Amino acid sequence: QQQVKQSPQSLIVQKGGISIINCAYENTAFDYFPWYQQFPGKGPALLIAIRPDVSEKKEGRFTISFNKSAKQFSLHIMDSQPGDSATYFCAASMSWRTSGSRLTFGEGTQLTVNP
Amino acid sequence: GAVVSQHPSWVICKSGTSVKIECRSLDFQATTMFWYRQFPKQSLMLMATSNEGSKATYEQGVEKDKFLINHASLTLSTLTVTSAHPEDSSFYICSASGTSGYLSYEQYFGPGTRLTVT
């Protein structure tokens, strides 16, 4: 019940295309859903996050779509660029917990954007 | 804001020796710090959670006597890998959560430390 399932495992997109990564969760107590971007040899960096009281959040070329009833959320990268090539992790946590909230990570998606 | 640093960025040590990795929150106070381990092409595996001034809580299967964690202040946590062996070679990443507002539930990650045990 603590798992977060992420797909696809790898994704190849042409420059200018839309990259879509999907995640599904089971635990309805999760109320905070961040996405992280990780380049090789680097730590993950927070990209964008959403709470279940909204169905969509957009920041620049990055959009999170959230479907509470289906317990699914997805990351859309518009106008994908070669510099977006990285590994993307979705995650979920229970933000109402005090003293830091443990993240449950998806398995990761390796995105390659071809020029 | 919310910058986390790690030192060293990479370290090579001989089998049987110990190595210490530092994690610092540079511009906020971190009440909670997390330590992760990541193998190539895999997700992050949580090793332990530490709160300032308290003993760390280790995940199932993580040897607390081998991976010593100290969270002595609101800006510093250390992970010491004792009697390291080649199978301990991995990418170790820390993260930190702050005291209030969004910092209390968001985790900010350090750049990671590549440990190679020969």
Image: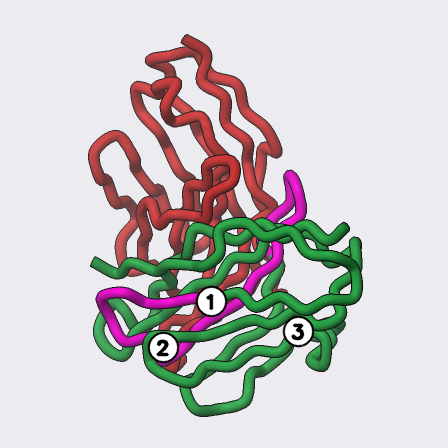
Tell me whether circle 1 and circle 3 mark residues in contact (CB < 8 Å): no
Residue A46 seen by the camera: yes
User: Could you tell me the amino acid type at mark 3?
Assistant: Phe
Label 1 or label 3, whichever comes before in sequence order:
1
User: Could you tell me the amino acid type at mark 1?
Assistant: Glu
Residue A71 seen by the camera: no
Please give the label number shown on residue B22.
1
The residue beneath circle 3 is B67
Q: Residue B20: x percent and y percent?
A: 57, 68
Alpha-carbon span between mark 2 and mark 3: 29 Å
Tell me what hue chain B is rendered in: green
Direction from residue A4 to residue A51 in the image, left or right: left
Q: What letter labels the chain drawn in red?
A: A
Viewer-closest of B68 and B104: B68
The residue depicted at 51 percent of the width and 57 percent of the height is: B93
Direction from residue B44 to residue A112 in the image, left or right: left
The residue beneath circle 2 is A96
Alpha-carbon span between mark 2 and mark 1: 28 Å
Closest to the camera, between mark 1 and mark 3, is: 1
The residue depicted at 47 percent of the width and 16 percent of the height is: A13
- Give the SS element for disc 1: strand
Q: Are dots 2 and 1 on a single chain?
A: no
Q: Residues within 10 Å of mark 2 (few under 14, many from 20)?
A: some
